[in-house]
Amino acid sequence: MPVLCCSRQRSCQLWGRRPRLRRTPWSGILALHLVPVALTAQTCDLHEYQPQPGLTATSTPAGLKLEWTGASNQQLRAEFLIRNGQPVIHELAARSASGTWKTIAYDLTPEFDATTGRRRMSEQQMAPLRGLKIALTPDVLAKERWNAFWDAPLNIPGEPKTNEDMPRKPEEIRRAQASYNITSCAVKTDGARLEVTFPGLAMGIFAGQLRFTVYKGTNLLRQEAIAKTEEQSVAYKYNGGLKGFAIDKSKGIFWEDVARAPHTYEFGGAVNRDPVALRARNRLAVVETNDGASLAIFPPPHKFFWAREIELNLGYVWYRKDSDASFSAGVRQAEHEEEYRPSAISDEVWERREKQSRHNIGNFALYNAPPGSWQHMAIYYYLSPENATNAQNAVLAFTHGDRFQPLPGFKVEVGHFHTHFNEQLSDAGTFDLQPTWVPVFRELGINVLMMADFHSDSHPTDPGPLRLKEQNVYFEGCARQSDRNFLIMPEEEPDATLGGHYTMSFPHPVYWTHVRQPGQPLVEQIPEYGQMYHVGSPADELEMLRREHGFVWQAHPRTKGSTGYPDAVREMEHFRSDRFMGASYQSLPVDLSQKRLCESRCFGTLDDMNNWAGPKYLIAEGDTYMKFPDDETYPHLMVNYVKLNQVPRYNQDWSPILSAMRAGDFFVTSGEVLFRNWGIEGTGSRRTYKADVDWTFPLEFVELVWGDGDKTGRQEISATSVSAFGSHHFEIPFDAAGKKWVRFAVWDSAGNGAFTQPVHLK
């Protein structure tokens, strides 16, 4: 059995073994006493390794050992070897600053598997393109299918007429376990991190490498399969983890269920054939050893998740008892959506919600894998010399306990949710029902919630009698559920006059209809409701927005029902006016080769809009449906931090919120990166972008992005030298000559991030 060993001359070689054995400190498990037998073996490349205090790679009798200083000056180590072409984590261990080493596990083997299907463009995307007279050529289909939302590649045969070239065929789905043919490794220092890469990974249509990364100043260990395929139109999901945990050395695997009750499985049951999915709160499971050390297991907080319409917890961590002696654990994605729990009293509403529950199954899009793109399939571990509870708390600190952290001078806003609120209230027969979705948002730390009902619910296109009554219920319900620091604003997502879908928001309740009949005035007084608008054209809508100080922005630009938008309206008075605020931001699609959330579609739209016209912004939205407290909502959500000292009451003017947003006085974040201050200093061509930033995960890079009215440029600055849980004052000088606008963003090593809105230069 060859294993990996590194010499003091900073080169690693494959070594054979003689039959002589010795006992490790962990009784019952044998380690190899290694001596070199062949000098012609391939080497482990260390020319990019630079030792530094608290972050070292050294040779051992067993292989390659990484040691690093973690949180609270805890010490961590991970030792690697190669056995029959298979990479092995020979040991994981941790100790407190003044304590003794505790072994967490011995002889763990990484495992990955991928399930692939075929990416298809949805009919929902094709319909607006047909309406714009855009021919659905092979090139258009090839481009737009990567922005599909309504696609479920693993749903065989699928619903007819929902996507191109249906039905799906069983042979499109392929499943593959990762295999390894490892003969070498490479060690690289990148700022305050060390990467160990093992080329020789194969996984069905994917091929690439296995990588482990450790970060100075934190106990994180990242394991990832980095692989690509050359096939066309591939959508995929992955599962991964570690195999070989010793049952007799472990207390068990710990997790909290969706109701926050703690659980432990001690592996006293029968052997498992398949992984057991845990519907664990916070997407987290922890293995604890008999001597009180632990290993937490979890996926990246946001980038692991593709967009869905509901957030049911599908079980994102797993265990598998492989024998009476060992078990495995890791992270996973399900293969299909599950129906949410519809509720209603009236038959009409029940049937609508029950149908919607099933229709959500048609959206399970998986990840994109364009040909030749290096997909980073990541798993995180947190090594701790302490027990499972302490490890759990340490991991939850990275996401602030899955809560959007309060920040002085800001309020957290997010919108675009379809809860059918007025139907719920009408069905219940009372305004004083507390819907299941209200505590979800309050627990997340949301201060301002902009709803988006009257989209697939109620009677949005009714000319008046039904719609106005339902709007009244909607407004009254929002008033009852709002509070001192929690405001529900009754927005709407119409797809009426402008084209595509868009979000509409006012600083107070406004009664209006999508219909203006011949001879009907734009504005009318209705005794029961007061002033209301009849809107029958884009001009009517824009006039209503101006009179009522409202704003619109394009919902899900360049995908779904807004495919082709806002491009199609860029010359319209709507878009050119100050009433058109921009477009929404949502992590859709997900391509794990990209460094940013929604890298191409969202930021491409943002940069294009600002090159076309005056200031336009990206506004974080959810675009999801019913919610329950046991859902896993946090990872699917990005939010806006709006400069605001206090939240207006429902019966007050909401203009401070919308005015701050229209001025660009907000930033968008996944929650792990926060801005305290930002702005541009200087005059003329010599300017400096300054920002005060806090973060949790180790950072990856910061960037300054600009446009000249035609094209976009950027300056990326590596931030890998900073550790987890930090703060920094960034100052980036730039030449303003020829630049129309600039914006700033910060991205961390787990794919989380935050960005400010474009500032147009004078």
Image (cartoon, grey):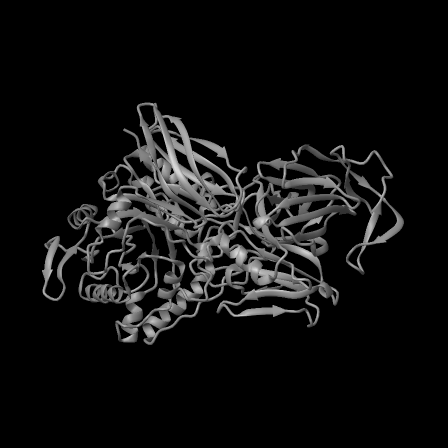
**Displayed quadrant of residue 629:** bottom left
**Displayed quadrant of residue 482:** bottom left
Which residue extends farthest front?
Answer: 98
Along the line of sight, which residue is nearer the eye, 597 or 438? 438
Q: Residue 240, percent across and down?
A: 62, 54
Q: Residue at x 23, y 49 (%)?
A: 656
Q: Residue 265, percent across and down?
A: 63, 69
Vertical placement of residue 559 versus 709, above or below: below
Instruction: Left or right? Give the position of 31 relative to 96.
Output: right
Q: Residue at x 10, y 57 (%)?
A: 524
Q: Quadrant of the C terminus?
A: top left
Q: Residue 500, percent across and down?
A: 32, 48
Q: Residue 142, percent across and down?
A: 48, 42
Res 424 seen here: yes
Q: Residue at x 61, y 50 (%)?
A: 74
Along the line of sight, which residue is nearer the eye, 731 or 385? 385
Res 155 seen here: no
Vertical placement of residue 684 versus 648, above or below: above
Along the line of sight, which residue is nearer the eye, 377 or 334? 377
Q: Residue at x 45, y 53 (%)?
A: 307
